[in-house]
Each structure stands twice: as structure tokens, then as C-alpha cells.
């Protein structure tokens, strides 16, 4: 535990004018207040606030902040009151401690609580005085360092909150070291296996490349010195979490990560930065697209530096950061560094008067003061904090973070794979909305689900998360395989029936070696895909069976004897069935038409009207002809596509007459195209969907009765 004199020494080291008596008073006050309280580790509790204060002395913060850190847990956990602290330490420290006390109970990742509201409280407290955030971050860092004493569930929750809220906030405030450590600790807690794996690989790499870092450092130093640039060079491998993120972001394996080493070049002046850059680029080839000038355009948290990557002396990629010691201060301490360049800065308002990070905080607070709705609030804060993410909520208030551009489909899969697979619609902020609409910050998303859904393969192109993409691919693959197997089974059952041979899975199983297939499923889907003929399967099971059937099926169909509940025909219910079925494009069959199915390799069955001229193309391929029959329940009101070709007289209102007739009969027009052939007549092609042949015929008859229409014909593909 840190001793009283150590605390004073730590502060005096960077601030000789620090109020020694005040620090001593705080130390004693906390010691007395926390008394015999213990932490989960068994240590005296007071060790915690003192460690927090120590972390803040590393950031070289002002005396008031250090004192507030020492006192930060007294009001909540001991008999101390705000009044007493105000009296003993003054209002500046009092308000800091008060702000910290208010933050103690915030749960920023709880599934149920209003996270927006809590986050708002957090920002309000820290924006009143940014030093509150600095203490809070140090508090969190020490809690993360000692997290292993907590029960596992609590550990997880705290780590999640750290990764989602506090680490990005530290980054936003530009306190890189703190951010890095928070991320490392949180990642280690949340994903210990991944952490260990990467950590071991990094160590392994370091072992194998012993001396490489020093070699590159020396090479850099030498090149710079040769041109008279005075520089300090230091290299190290990257942090585990940053390696992990890179692997995740770019879907790379560890072996593919070529730049796990980063080097920092500190030079005296701004001009030297660019000169050093020129020297490095002259000495080694630069990797295109990697150069960034954060000196002329600083990051939002005031970070300034030059970044580049070159192919180094050993032909490996070397990442370089070039900057001055002043820039280095900001890179390390961020908003905390701003106090260093100002004389006698102690108050929160003055602290970081020049800091863009602080300006951001002020802007955010101004928005709050204007009484923004929680949605707008999130829009403005989290949006800027995590600018490449959108934050949406489930109706129960669960926060879902998604990459920018994500859709409700991504959201659904982020909640659960089952939710994604069964999604049929979305309510965004209470309003029905297409599933593929891009989500905005603060959207509340409710997924409308229906059982027995299969995600359409086209969804793959509408999502931005890998999780959704993989799940869609898996679900459609499974569904398609199941569909083909279902079709294959129907085809086989009928083939065996016609052959008057019993069919069972067992019999099929026995014939697998003869069929050169590994499973029943395999046979079924091969037949469904048209990759294997049903006749071959029958012969595989009953080797002496003689098959006459293909020709017969076609004759059957041609003779128009199918379609009447013949036991061997496959029932057709429409396109949305569990069979891979399509209707011939450009004028398909409707119930009432006599139909035949054509099995095309990998395409399932296409339904044609028996009169279709397109069928001639399959005449020499008897195995592809499948007996099918309609099995449509008129009650369901399913519609089927058909096409009409009309000739209409060119006079005003002709087209209106035609469409009116179709509408009057409750036909659905899907598409209309017109071609004027002569001055007097126009050819009109109408794609419409109807319930059945009767329905279609009624429309055709009425159209024929109209004087504006000179000719109506049905188009069959
Ligand atoms: Mn604490």
C-alpha cells in the first residue's frame, strides 16, 4: 500500500508547488473513513483509492484531482458526507467527489436498464468537470487490474462495460496508455483463450526474432544520424488486443499479420518530423496507402504524429510513428497533457482550454442542456465516440452495437441466429420498415418473426456483419439441401410406385454401395437436383427391374392424362413450397392448366403448361420429365403468374379500359409493356397474376368484349 510520504513525493515530482498539507489531510481522512474495510482481495480498502491516486500521478494531474481520487469512495462507502468534504477540502474537491459518487452506481451494459439514460448521466458528470472522468478512468483501471478477485459473472460484466464504454472514452480523451491497458485487461477477461493464444504467439515471435527490434532500431538511428537528424527510436510489438482487432477486422490469420512491430521516432522539431519521414522513405520502400499526416490534420483527440509503413531492412513491414516530444505528451496523456503547458492551471474549466477533446465534451454537454431526447443524445455522443458504429436498442432496452451501414437483418442476427433466420419484417421506432433499411443511431428495432422461414439467399448482400452473412449462408444451404432431398424423395417414391416395387429407406440404404453414394440424404438430393435418374435408383435397389417409364411419362403428359390425382404425380402448391419449384418465365401455368415438370440439373423443377412450345427442347431428354399435378386450395388465394398479349386500338383511354377490366376482376398487374406497330394498333403485353384458369379466362372474355381491344391471346412460354 502506498505510504503517505510516497503520495506527496509522487505529486511533488511534477508539481513542486503542490499543497502538501492538503494531500496529507486527504490521506488521513480516507484512512480513517475506510477504517477496517477490506477489498475482495483481502487488502485494506483504502489501498484502492490510493492506487487510483497513484495512477493519476502518472498522468501528472493537479493536486485537487489527486485529492478527489483519494476521497472518491468515501461518501458512498463510509459515514462521510458531502458537507463534511466540502468543509474540510473546499468546494472544488467537494464537487469532484460528488460527481464521482453519482457515477458509482451506473451500470452501462446492463441488459434491461436504460443505457442511454445512464450514459447521459455519465457524460453530464464528466462534462461538468473533465477531471471526474480522469478519476473514473483511473478507478476503472485499478478495478480491472484487481478484477480476478471478483466472482466470474461480475468480472464479465465489468469487462464488457470497460471495453464498450470506458476504453473508447479514454481513447476519445486521447489517453492512449490508459486505453490500451483497459482494453488488454478487458479482452483478457472476456476472451482468455484468444488472449493467451495471441500472447504466446507474440512471445514466440519475439523469441524467434531475437535482436530484430534492436537491429531495426539501429538501422533507423543510423540513417537519421547520417542526415543530421537527432532522434530517439524505440520499437516494440503490438498489444494483444490491437493484434486481435486487426485479425478480426481484416479476417486475417496471425501468420498473415506482417506488421506486429511498431516503432516510434521522436525528433526535436516539427520540421524534423518531415525530414525524418523523407529519410525513411528514401532508405526503404514505403507501403502504399499507409502514410498518414496527423500533424497537419490532428485527430479529434488532438493526437498529432506522422504514420507510415516501410519494408524494413530485413524485408519485413515496419510501422513507424514520427513525432516530437510535445506530440508524444499528447499522444500519451491526451486531455491530461494540456494542463502541462499552462501556468497554474488547476480548475477544470481552464484545464484543456485548447483541447479539442475537451471541446467535444463541452459540445456534448451543450446538447444535453438543450434537453435532447435520449435518441438525439445518443446520436450526438456515441456517434462521435464510436463513429464507425451504430447503436440500436431492442424493445427491452438491450443495446446492440453494429458497424455503420448495418441493417435490421444484421440486428436480428446480432440478437440471435434464430431471430435472424425467422425474421420477416422489422419495426423501427415503432414503424414497419423494410428489413434492409440502414439503421441509424438510437433506433429501436423490433424484429417481426414467423416460424418456418428460410432467409432468402439475397440477404447475404444486404448485411454488413460477418455473423449475419455466415448464418444466412448456412441456413440457405441447409434449406436448399433439404428442399432438393424432399423433391428427390417424392420423385423416388413415385418411381418405385410406378415400378410396383416397395420403397423404403432401408432398401435404399442397402443399395448405397451400388449407387456409389454415401448416405440416403445424398441419394435423395442427387435425384432432386437432377444429377441422378430415378430409374437408376430403382435399378440400383432392384437390379433386374426393366424400366419403361420415361417415355411413358412424357406420353402421359402429352396425352393430357396427368393432373387428375394420379397417385404418381408430384403435387404442386405454388412457388413457396418446400420443394425447389419454379414456374416457366414469360407465361407460366395457372391451376386448371395441364402441366408437366421439367427437372433441370441443379435448378429443381420448372412447371410448364403442356401446350408450351418450350417443352420441345426437352423431347430428347425423357428422364427430365416429371409427372406433376396441381394441389391448390382455392381458400388460400394464392396467385400464379401468367401473360396476355393484346392488340388495342389507338384511341385515348384504351389502356385505361384494359387495366380497369383486370382490376375489376381482382387480377394483379405485375408489368405492362407496349409497342406501337401501326398508326392504328398497339401491341400490349401484360404480366398478371391470377388465382386459376377460370379467373384468367373470365378476364380474357371481358377484354375481348371491349371495343378498344381487337385481339387477346394468352402467351405460353
Ligand atoms: Mn473506486
Image (cartoon, rainbow, N blue to C red):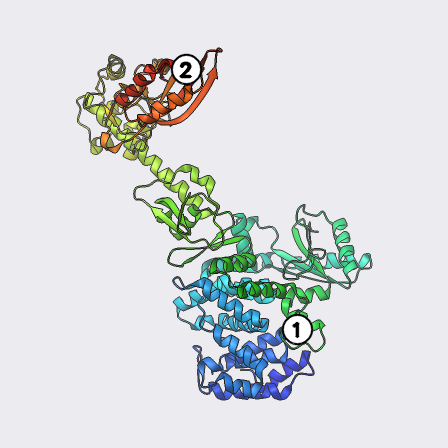
| Quarter of the rendering containing residue 5 | bottom right
Looking at the image, can residue 223 be seen? no
- Residue 659, image x, y percentages: 38, 24
Extreme residue in the front direction: 652
- Residue 392, image x, y percentages: 45, 54
- Residue 520, image x, y percentages: 27, 34
Disc 2 residue lies near ligand 1 with CB under 8 A: no
The residue mark sitting in front, 2 or 1, is 2
| Image side of residue 251 versus residue 275, left or right | left
| Quarter of the rendering containing residue 493 | top left
Q: Earlier in the sequence, mark 2 or mark 1?
A: 1
- Residue 689, image x, y percentages: 34, 26
Instruction: Using the image as rendered, state which of residue 274 and residue 66 is in the foreground.
Output: 66
Looking at the image, can residue 575 be seen? yes
Check residue 350 in the rendering and tell me which mark sits there, or answer none. Answer: 1
Mark 2: secondary structure: strand
Check residue 648 in the rendering and tell me which mark sits there, or answer none. Answer: 2
The Cα–Cα distance between marks 2 and 1, rounded to whole angstroms, is 82 Å
The answer to whether residue 303 is above or below residue 76 is above
- x 42%, y 72%: residue: 150
Mark 1: secondary structure: loop
The answer to whether residue 273 is above or below residue 177 is above
> Crowdedness of circle 2 by 10 Å Cα count: few (<14), some, many (20+)?
many
Q: How many marks?
A: 2
**Quarter of the figure with the C terminus:** top left
> Crowdedness of circle 1 by 10 Å Cα count: few (<14), some, many (20+)?
few
Check residue 36 in the rendering and tell me which mark sits there, or answer none. Answer: none
Q: Are dots 2 and 1 in contact, CB under 8 Å?
A: no
| Image side of residue 346 versus residue 416, left or right | right
Instruction: Using the image as rendered, state which of residue 418 and residue 495 is in the foreground.
Output: 418
The answer to whether residue 24 is above or below residue 56 is below
- x 37%, y 20%: residue: 643
Amino acid at each position: 500500500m502506498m505510504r503517505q510520504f510516497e503520495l506527496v513525493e509522487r505529486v511533488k515530482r511534477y508539481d513542486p508547488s503542490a499543497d502538501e498539507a492538503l494531500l496529507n489531510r486527504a490521506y488521513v481522512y480516507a484512512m480513517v473513513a475506510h477504517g477496517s474495510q477490506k477489498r475482495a482481495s483481502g487488502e485494506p480498502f483504502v489501498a484502492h483509492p490510493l492506487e487510483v491516486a497513484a495512477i493519476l500521478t502518472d498522468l501528472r494531474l493537479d493536486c485537487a484531482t489527486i485529492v478527489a481520487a483519494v476521497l472518491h469512495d468515501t461518501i458512498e462507502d463510509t459515514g462521510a458526507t458531502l458537507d463534511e468534504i466540502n468543509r474540510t477540502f473546499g468546494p472544488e474537491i467537494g464537487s469532484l467527489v460528488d460527481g464521482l459518487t453519482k457515477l458509482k452506481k451506473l451500470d452501462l451494459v446492463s441488459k434491461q436498464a436504460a443505457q442511454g439514460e445512464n450514459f447521459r448521466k455519465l457524460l453530464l458528470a464528466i462534462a461538468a468537470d473533465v477531471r471526474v472522468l480522469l478519476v473514473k478512468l483511473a478507478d476503472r483501471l485499478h478495478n480491472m487490474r484487481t478484477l480476478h478477485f471478483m466472482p466470474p459473472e461480475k468480472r464479465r460484466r465489468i469487462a464488457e462495460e470497460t471495453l464498450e464504454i470506458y476504453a473508447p472514452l479514454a481513447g476519445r480523451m486521447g489517453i492512449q496508455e490508459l486505453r490500451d491497458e483497459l482494453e488488454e485487461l478487458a479482452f483478457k477477461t472476456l476472451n482468455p483463450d484468444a488472449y493467451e493464444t495471441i500472447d504466446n504467439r507474440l512471445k514466440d515471435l519475439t523469441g524467434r526474432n531475437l535482436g530484430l527490434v534492436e537491429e531495426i532500431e539501429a538501422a533507423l538511428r543510423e540513417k537519421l544520424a547520417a542526415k543530421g537528424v537527432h532522434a530517439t527510436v524505440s520499437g516494440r510489438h503490438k498489444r494483444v488486443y490491437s493484434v486481435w482487432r486487426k485479425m478480426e477486422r481484416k479476417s486475417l490469420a496471425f501468420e498473415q499479420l506482417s506488421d506486429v512491430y511498431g516503432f516510434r521516432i521522436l525528433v526535436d522539431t516539427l520540421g524534423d518530423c518531415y525530414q525524418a519521414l523523407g529519410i525513411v522513405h528514401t532508405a526503404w520502400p514505403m507501403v502504399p496507402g499507409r502514410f498518414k499526416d496527423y500533424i497537419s490534420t490532428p485527430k479529434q483527440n488532438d493526437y498529432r504524429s506522422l504514420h507510415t509503413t516501410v519494408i524494413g531492412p530485413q524485408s519485413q513491414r515496419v510501422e513507424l510513428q514520427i513525432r516530437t516530444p510535445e506530440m508524444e505528451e499528447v499522444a500519451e496523456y491526451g486531455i491530461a497533457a494540456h494542463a502541462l503547458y499552462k501556468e497554474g492551471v488547476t480548475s477544470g474549466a481552464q484545464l484543456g482550454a485548447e483541447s479539442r477533446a475537451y471541446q467535444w465534451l463541452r459540445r456534448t454537454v451543450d446538447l444535453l442542456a438543450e434537453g435532447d431526447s435520449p435518441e438525439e443524445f445518443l446520436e450526438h455522443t456515441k456517434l462521435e465516440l464510436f463513429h464507425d458504429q451504430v447503436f440500436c436498442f431492442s424493445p427491452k432496452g438491450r443495446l446492440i452495437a453494429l458497424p455503420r451501414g448495418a441493417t435490421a437483418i444484421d440486428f436480428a442476427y446480432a440478437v440471435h441466429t434464430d431471430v435472424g433466420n425467422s425474421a420477416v419484417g422489422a419495426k423501427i421506432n415503432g414503424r414497419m420498415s423494410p428489413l434492409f433499411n440502414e439503421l441509424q443511431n438510437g433506433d429501436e428495432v423490433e424484429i417481426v418473426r414467423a416460424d418456418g422461414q428460410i432467409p432468402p439467399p439475397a440477404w447475404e448482400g444486404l448485411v454488413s456483419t460477418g455473423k449475419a452473412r455466415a448464418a444466412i449462408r448456412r441456413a440457405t444451404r441447409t434449406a436448399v439441401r433439404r428442399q432438393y432431398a424432399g423433391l428427390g424423395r417424392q420423385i423416388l417414391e413415385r418411381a418405385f410406385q410406378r415400378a410396383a416395387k416397395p420403397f423404403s429407406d432401408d432398401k435404399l440404404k442397402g443399395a448405397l454401395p451400388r449407387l456409389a453414394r454415401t448416405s440416403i440424404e445424398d441419394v435423395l438430393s442427387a435425384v432432386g437436383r437432377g444429377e441422378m435418374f430415378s430409374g437408376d435408383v430403382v435399378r440400383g435397389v432392384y437390379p433386374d427391374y426393366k424400366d419403361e417409364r420415361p417415355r411413358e411419362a412424357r406420353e402421359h403428359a402429352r396425352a393430357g392424362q396427368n393432373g387428375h390425382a394420379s397417385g404418381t404425380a408430384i403435387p404442386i402448391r405454388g412457388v413457396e413450397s418446400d420443394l425447389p419449384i419454379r414456374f416457366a418465365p414469360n407465361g407460366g401455368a395457372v391451376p386448371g392448366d395441364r402441366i408437366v415438370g421439367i427437372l433441370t440439373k441443379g435448378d429443381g423443377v420448372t412447371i410448364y403448361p403442356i401446350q408450351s412450345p418450350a417443352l420441345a427442347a426437352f423431347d430428347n431428354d425423357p428422364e427430365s420429365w416429371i409427372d406433376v399435378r396441381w394441389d391448390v386450395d382455392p381458400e388460400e388465394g394464392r396467385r400464379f403468374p401468367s401473360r396476355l398479349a393484346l392488340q388495342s386500338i389507338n384511341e385515348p383511354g384504351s389502356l385505361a379500359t384494359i387495366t380497369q377490366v383486370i382490376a375489376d376482376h381482382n387480377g394483379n398487374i405485375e408489368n405492362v409493356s407496349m409497342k406501337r406497330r401501326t398508326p392504328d394498333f398497339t401491341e400490349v403485353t401484360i404480366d398478371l397474376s391470377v388465382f386459376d384458369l377460370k379467373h384468367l379466362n373470365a378476364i380474357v372474355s371481358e377484354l375481348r368484349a371491349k371495343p378498344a381491344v381487337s385481339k387477346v391471346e394468352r402467351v405460353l412460354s
